[in-house]
Image (cartoon, rainbow, N blue to C red):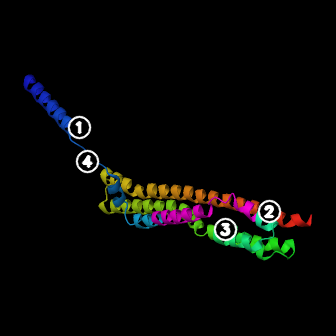
Amino acid sequence: MITLLIQDTTQALQDTANAVNQALTQPQPQLRFIDLLFKGGWVMIPLAFLAFLALFIFVERYLTIKKATKDESNLMGQIRSYIQSGNLDGAMSLLRNNNSPLSRMLQKGLKRIGRPIKDIEGAIENVGKLEVSKLEKNISILGIVAGIAPMLGFVGTIVGVITIFHQVSIKGAIEIGTISGGLYTKMITSATGLIIGIIAYVLYHILNIMVEKIILKMETDAIDFIDLLEEPGK
């Protein structure tokens, strides 16, 4: 009897070991990123829209600002030569052909030559503000996306958690598979929202830094232009 019991126990342990080995050696399903995105639910649709919107605005603004930052190192030198020689028409023609925020700002100043310096400064300042507002157009939307995307992703996770516990209340039993399986898919929205928010936040500050560099250059050249106009009167 003891021998049979030992044999049965040995056989049971062997069967268990075989089952464990088979489970360990069985290939596990691959967790692909694209599959995770589709499991995120309806919240992934507005998140995808926000991601596309942020990327579109960044590319459009980046190209516009980059165009406005073209090399103008010789512009003020040429303008200085024209004005000192009294060739205002040549200076105006040069600025028209340049077609940049700085050139449009200086054009307004040239048109006001003959008036008090304060009027010229005011005209240049007004055009400068207008040009800066054009460069900053839609950049603030990136800041909005950076704030909304994480919150929207968190809402998706909360809705998913509510759904899971609603199912548990209907079944009347807590199943680890139901909770863990549903929870990890719903947390995808929070992760996606955070990633989109972080990227939008970085892009927002990149564009702001680029605009600030242009503003500094415009202010510096505007001061040089005013000083140039005051030179003959000294």
Which residue is rendered at x = 62% and y = 64% of the image?
A: 68
- Dot 3, how many residues are within 10 Å of its Cα: few (below 14), some (14-19), or many (20+)? many
Mark 3 or 4: the one toward you? 3
Q: Which mark is residue 24?
A: 1
From the image, give the main secondary structure of the stretch colored magenta.
Answer: helix
Could you tell me the amino acid type at mark 3?
Pro
Q: Earlier in the sequence, mark 1 or mark 3?
A: 1
- Dot 1, how many residues are within 10 Å of its Cα: few (below 14), some (14-19), or many (20+)? few
Q: Earlier in the sequence, mark 4 or mark 2?
A: 4
Which quadrant of the structure image shows residue 79?
Answer: bottom right
Mark 1 in CB contact with mark 4 (< 8 angstroms): no
Mark 1 in CB contact with mark 3 (< 8 angstroms): no
Could you tell me the amino acid type at mark 2?
Ile
**Magenta part of the protein: which range?**
51-80
User: Is residue 126 highlighted in magenta?
Assistant: no
Judging by the rendered image, the residue that carries numbered circle 2 is 223
Q: Earlier in the sequence, mark 1 or mark 4?
A: 1
User: Is residue 66 highlighted in magenta?
Assistant: yes
Quick one: SS at disc 2?
Answer: helix
Quadrant of the image for the N terminus? top left
Judging by the rendered image, the residue that carries numbered circle 4 is 29
Quick one: SS at disc 4?
Answer: loop
Mark 4 or 2: the one toward you? 2
Judging by the rendered image, the residue that carries numbered circle 3 is 101
